[in-house]
Amino acid sequence: MPGTETLDVVLSFDFDAEEVWIGSDPANADRPGTLSQGTYGAKVAVPAILALLDRLGLPATFFVPGRVAERHPHRVGEIVAAGHELGHHGYTHTHPARLTPEQEEAELVRGLEVLRGFGAEVTGYRSPAWSFSPVTLDLLVRHGFTYSSNLMDDLRPYLHPGHDLVELPVHWTLDDAPHFWFDNSSWTKTIRSAAEVRAIWAEEAAGYRALGGLYMLTMHPQVIGRPGRLLMLEAFLTDLRDQPGTRFLQAGQAAARARAALGT
């Protein structure tokens, strides 16, 4: 609620690995230099992030494409063993609007099968593009999802009209990719410093404390997992954790609390 000076935080990681590059251009499957950017996420960043979360005693939600889980099962197993939540992030990292309804449902079902094979209860969905097709919400309800984390139209969780599905809003400001992502298809983008991004995230945290809402950080292991950024992240999260009124939740927990508050 506004003015309560509390802050509910969800740490979410989109563990895309190589699939983000293949989903944007299938020809990247034959470009090892390009794919190595994603491999870094699985090889180096995820272990470092898990160690960071363990040091701070913080829970997180990892949204994982099914093919990433198939390619890096040991890493997904480590995420689950550490007590973190798994969320659905497609089977391939393909924009739902590029798929027929039948293809989209097949992707949804296959991804669920893979992730549930790790013994995880998978109830949340994050689109590979933070976007929906005309049938996405219907499919999510049909296949038992309880929450989505894709839209930018609010600060607070809400129930989708006509669908028994809680939305946990996101925003580019609280995503690491717009600040740090570099793709050599365009050499005009400047990579921001970790200090600049920490300042932006801290400003937003102060705003959320004042206005209320769910502070949803969206991060990508291959992006946030660079050494200097990890140092920033640990310092920033330590500061957040130590401020009175901060509560860290997994996305599924935040959705359940929102559902209870909404009386549904």
Image (tube, rainbow, N blue to C red):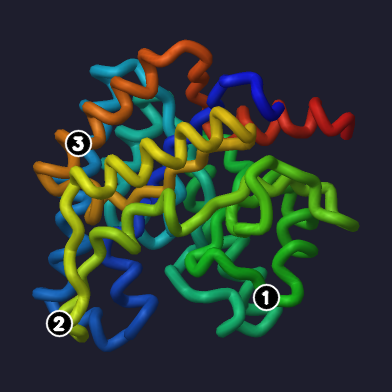
Count residues near mark 1 (Cα–Cα under 10 Å), then give few for <14, some for 14-19, many for 20+: some
Disc 2 or disc 1, which is closer to the eye? Answer: 2
Q: Amino acid at mark 1?
A: Ser
Image check: 164 left or right of 76?
right
Which quadrant would residue 25 be assigned to in this image?
bottom left
Q: Are marks 3 and 2 in contact (CB under 8 Å)?
A: no
Disc 2 is placed on an element classified as: loop
**What residue appears at the point 67 percent right and 75 percent down from the top-left corner?**
133
Q: Which residue is mark 1?
A: 133
**What residue appears at the point 38 percent right and 23 percent down from the top-left corner?**
240
Q: Reading the chain from its start, which is encountered first: label 1 or label 3?
A: 1
Quick check: can you spot residue 118? no
Which quadrant would residue 241 be assigned to in this image?
top left
Image check: 84 left or right of 26?
right
**What residue appears at the point 52 percent right and 14 percent down from the top-left corner?**
245
Instruction: Give how far apart the Cα atoms at labels 3 and 2 are.
Output: 25 Å
Q: Quadrant of the N terminus?
A: top right
| Whether residue 30 is situated above or below residue 148 in the rendered picture | below
Q: Position of residue 260 (x, y in %)?
A: 80, 26
Q: In this view of the protein, which residue sits in the foreground, 1 or 19? A: 1
Q: Position of residue 224 (x, y in %)?
A: 24, 48
Count residues near mark 2 (Cα–Cα under 10 Å), then give few for <14, some for 14-19, many for 20+: few
Q: Which residue is mark 3?
A: 232
